[in-house]
Amino acid sequence: MNGIEIRAGLEEPEEKGRPAAALLYLEAGLFGVLLLLDSLKGVSFSGWVVYPVTALLCWAIWYTCYGSRRAYLLLVLGAVGVYGAVVFGMEDVFREQIWYLIGCVLGGSKAEPIDVTETMLLTAALLAFFTAMLEFLIRSHRLLYFMTTGLLLLAPFWGIRAGAGTVLLLALFQAAFWILQGDGGTVWRASFEGVNKRQILERSSLFAGIAILAAFLAVFPLISVNADAFYTWIYERESQVYGMLKRLTGRDTAPSAGGTMGRGNQYRTGIPLLEVETDVEPTEPLYLCGFQGDEYVGGRWSALGESGLFETVEEKLGWQMYSNGRFSAGSLYDSMYFMMNTNTQAEEQPRYRNLKICHLNGEYENMYTPYYSQRGWGWSGAFHEGYLFWYYEQQDMNVAWDNVYEDFAVIRDWYRTLRDAYMEEMRIAYTKVPVQLLPRLTGLCSENHHDSLEEITAFILFTLHENAEYTMTPGWAPLNEDIVEYFLFDSGRGYCEHFAAAATLMYRLYGIPARYASGYMVQPSAFEQQEGGSWKAVVTDREAHAWVEIFLEDYGWTPVEVTPAEGGGSAARYPGFDNAVFRQLVQAGGWDAEKPGLHIASADGEETTWRQAFPEFVFAGEKYSHVLVTIGIYSLCLLPLFLDYRRLRQLKKLEIMGSRKVFFRLLEMLRFAAMMPEYDGTEADFAPKLAALTGVPEREIAGMQRIVSEAAYGKSPVAPEAERDVRRVYLLLAEAVYSRLRRRKRLLFRYWKAFF
């Protein structure tokens, strides 16, 4: 016979057997994800239903994947049909549960908790088929590795407290499948002489699982017993990284104050930022305000802008015609209390102090203002750069509206008129609270009624100090939780920003005008006397601080310290309040440290639901079109990945394929491309005609025919070099054929048939 024998029915042998470890690791990954979702605040489902059903589905997928691919296809089609029918029949149930889960993830669920078993079953099924396709069929672990790692890393930011079991299961899933999809490695091969590749990989993954379990059992108890030391070590390393990044970016020398609430740990570098100098030794903490908050918008305060408020005041007073910048209502108000205190008659007139502030980095975009002050000018020995204030300490304030110098009486009347008009407007502006964002805080204040400012302050201080601990390293707060409510009702740990924000909102809920303020607070002990007699302090980021401002009729906006003092005591002080009264009120009220159970309430007293926070989706088409769209998008997202990896797998098989099978695949490729369909490769003019159609040299094709003929009828096996030549010529021909096809047929040629 002069022809070439082609055995079209030959296929590469597949590895037999079902690796039991693969089923174990698949279930570990799915159970780990389900446990992670179960840890999401507000999520509840029937574990006795979800976990057994998931385990059974994993077994069915594993059994069919490693047995009959036809059975696996039937399983997939059956699952699509069953779940499609369930989703169609229970559309309202799934809609409600999905919205509820979105509320839990994005904003903390504000609805009555509901059972989401049906949605979790659907989620588990989708995850099972997706995971099995990647691990069992495509055998690519990289995507799932990054997905599960991302889930663990992002969990704290979404309020998910991943338990030890979740971490262990996902670590086992990641490590074991990473090894199963590897090549075994020379070390493992040396350890298991005579064992095939699949067994090597299975045993390697088993040893990895045992090692992970042993390490977990050894490390977890140590961390649990020494949690404080462990986290202290972590925070020290984080602090070093934070300081290094600030120095590299140049932000370590930038004085700053703002209204964004910190959601993580705070670290101070001790870099000098400001230099402040007074002509008289300070006896009280010096508050330098660089930011004042207007409205709380969830996690941050909008910057104060009182121009609109003062325009309203001027309109009510009929002062518009006199307003010209320097003599506007706003400019008059800024220095009003300083001027009133200066012109109040007293036996011993208080002396104002000179304060010079210098920014050590030379930038003055944001200025820092002391309380009870007025911008000053002149002072011998002033800094080359900086600005000057005249200010009073709080103990020197003694405004008496009816006891001023006679030549100041007219200005006093203007001030009094301005004060009354301002107080009327600011009571509206600075008692606003977004109650829909703060249901628990709103409920706390409504359940504990108090009237006087002293009682309200005492209750606020007691609530903060008994239910929260001051620390600069409280850990990271979830992104889907309001930071103030999370600080006060969940974590119980925070720093000055959290204490000040919570107190500001509580004052407002009680109808007391209050503002959030931040900047620097410099203790008297920080000042050192200079040779010229002045007192100077160098301010670092360790003096950065946040506090509350409340409005007092004879003082204006006054700082109130609500952050616990060192040792846990109260440092609050303002005119008319002292800590002795605070202790008496706590004792008389019989307050305990337990927080009351709260209901979710809105401003009008009606229950607020999570659905109000999220708009409804709008879908075009039929009532259930969104279900079909979801399934279609899911399938389309997976299809390119599947087809591309399938093509790569086929090309991988080509590297070990015999010359006869390669030649048969060449003939199949030519028939698909409608090139020489009547030829079977035995014809004498096969090589020249194919060369003319493809541009591949005739000698290469003829050499390929000769090698395949020797493989079919030769007495000795074909050399490996000759086999490689056949595969090389095949790839040349495939590339040439591909370049001559139309675009649509190219896609089928490359990805569906996987010829090239």
Image (cartoon, rainbow, N blue to C red):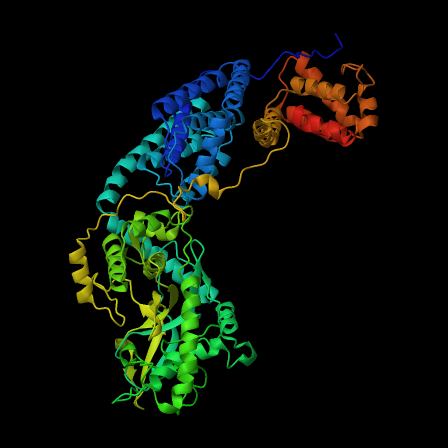
Which of the 4 image quadrants contains residue 620?
top right
**Residue situated in front as seen by the camera: 73 or 298:** 298
Q: Position of residue 213 (x, y in %)?
A: 31, 33
Q: Position of residue 263 (x, y in %)?
A: 39, 54
Q: Is residue 484 left or right of residue 588?
A: right
Whether residue 191 can be seen here: no
Q: Is residue 737 above or below residue 5?
A: below
> Where, quadrant-wise, is the N terminus in this rendering?
top right
Q: Position of residue 676 (x, y in %)?
A: 81, 19
Q: Is residue 614 left or right of residue 697?
A: left
- Numbered disc total: 0
**Residue situated in front as seen by the camera: 192 or 357:** 357
Which of the 4 image quadrants contains residue 301?
bottom left
> Where, quadrant-wise, is the C terminus in this rendering?
top right
Whether residue 142 can be seen here: yes
**Residue situated in front as seen by the camera: 532 or 16:** 532
Q: Is residue 220 left or right of residue 166?
A: left
Q: Is residue 587 above or below residue 214?
A: below
